[in-house]
Image (spheres, helix red, strand yellow):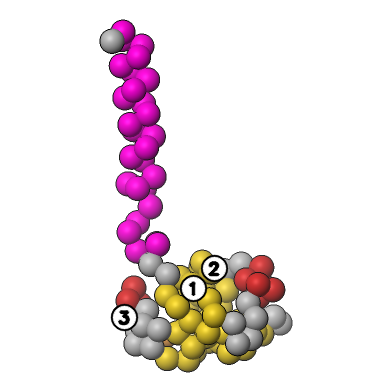
Amino acid sequence: MSRLVKTLAGLCVALTLAPSLTVPAFAADYTKGVVQKVDAKAKKLTIKHEELKNLDMPAMTMVFFVADPDMLTKAKEGGSIEFVAERLRGKLTVTEMK
Ligand SMILES: [Cu+2]
């Protein structure tokens, strides 16, 4: 194996491993919920959610802010979602939704 090929092979391994090292494990933990209310004006969603392990919160219905206003158009009242919530500047905020 030439030196160049060895270098390229090493780079490929580094690029393959890098994403899993930089993304925190909890970022992928989606929680199931049902949208109860969409408040586009206040940029809030009322979600009946299952246990939120990262926030140490049991299942309940509550209001969240959204990190991205696009989520308000994607969310439908009565619709099932999977989402990630985090405490941003003291406000419980939906940061990911699918
Ligand atoms: Cu809650």
Q: Earlier in the sequence, mark 3 or mark 1?
A: 3
Q: Is mark 1 within 8 Å of ligand 1?
A: no
Left or right of residue 2, residue 70 in this image? right
Marks 3/2: CA distance? 22 Å
Estimate how packed mark 3 is, as few (under 14), some (14 to 19) or many (20 or more) residues with alpha carbons within 10 Å: few
Where's residue 52, x and y in %?
37, 79
**Residue underneath mark 3:** 56
- Nearer the viewer's eye, disc 3 or disc 1? 1
- Which residue lies at the image location 54% right of the left edge and 68% below the top edge? 98
The answer to whether the residue labelled 2 contacts the one labelled 1, judged by CB atoms less than 8 Å apart, is yes
- Which residue lies at the image location 34% right of the left edge and 73% below the top edge? 54
Marks 3/1: CA distance? 17 Å
The answer to whether the residue labelled 3 contacts the one labelled 2, judged by CB atoms less than 8 Å apart, is no
* Secondary element at image label 3: loop
Marks 2/1: CA distance? 5 Å
Q: Identity of the amino acid at label 2? A: Lys
Is 63 located above or below residue 96 in the figure?
Answer: below
Q: Is residue 24 magenta?
A: yes
| Magenta-highlighted residues | 2-28
Q: Earlier in the sequence, mark 2 or mark 1?
A: 1
Q: Identity of the amino acid at label 1? A: Glu
**Residue underneath mark 1:** 82
Mark seen at residue 98? 2
Is 91 located above or below residue 7 in the figure?
Answer: below
Left or right of residue 74, residue 94 in this image? left
Q: Is mark 3 within 8 Å of ligand 1?
A: no
Q: Identity of the amino acid at label 3? A: Asp
Where's residue 3, x and y in %?
31, 10
Q: Residue furthest left?
A: 1
Is 30 located above or below residue 48 in the figure?
Answer: above
* Secondary element at image label 2: loop
Which of the 4 image quadrants contains residue 39? bottom right
